[in-house]
Amino acid sequence: MGKPISKTIVNISLQENTYYENIDDLNRMLREYNDAVTNLSEIEKKLFENKIKELNYKLEQQLESCNLCSLGINTFIQNYTNEINTFKDLKRNVSKSAQMIEDVVVNIERGELLRDFDFKTNDKK
């Protein structure tokens, strides 16, 4: 066409790989979020309601201020991934504690408070 290519277009083309890496990182982060939040039982949803609201709020804040060209996009991805991992650790610890409580209840349920006593064998004395 004979016209010079603008600096903006050159800069975008030079950053193409970075944009694709950011997109991959964002997709990975969102998959982690979905894995952490979507398979909760009704009880867990109620228990973690405030924490999920907090995660959503932090995500929404960043969505308004970041774009693929933002210098802080990598920091946001790392920080939010850390938040997700913290939530997953909390969820894992609560699940582990619930399982321990359930095991104790089952052991109490199965426990013998009184032993069977064979009165016939003791009558012979």
Image: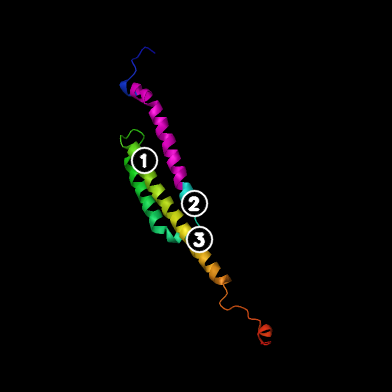
- Mark 1 lies on a secondary structure that is helix
Q: How many marks?
A: 3
- Mark 3 lies on a secondary structure that is helix
Q: Are marks 3 and 1 in contact (CB under 8 Å)?
A: no
Image color mode: rainbow
Tell me, for residue 99, which label it has, or none.
3
Question: Reading the chain from its start, which is encountered first: label 3 or label 1?
Answer: 1
Question: Reading the chain from its start, which is encountered first: label 1 or label 2?
Answer: 2
Q: Amino acid at mark 1?
A: Gln
Q: Main secondary structure of the magenta part?
A: helix
Relative to 19, say whether 1 is above or below: above
Q: Amino acid at mark 3?
A: Gln
Q: Which residues are magenta?
A: 9-33
**Residue toward you, 98 or 10:** 98
Question: For the residues marked 3 and 1, what is the alpha-carbon distance in whole angstroms?
Answer: 31 Å
Disc 2 marks which residue? 38
User: Around disc 2, counting alpha carbons within 10 Å, would you say few (fewer than 14), some (14 to 19), or many (20 or more)?
Assistant: few
**Which residue reaches farthest top?**
2
In the image, what residue occupies the spot 49% across and 51% down?
38
In the image, what residue occupies the spot 47% across and 57% down?
96
Residue 87 is left or right of residue 121, and the answer is left
Quadrant location of the C terminus in the rendered image: bottom right
In the image, what residue occupies the spot 39% across and 55% down?
51
Q: Quadrant of residue 70?
A: top left
Question: For the residues marked 2 and 3, what is the alpha-carbon distance in whole angstroms?
Answer: 20 Å
Quadrant location of the N terminus in the rendered image: top left
Q: Amino acid at mark 2?
A: Thr
Please tell me whether residue 36 belongs to the stretch shown in magenta: no
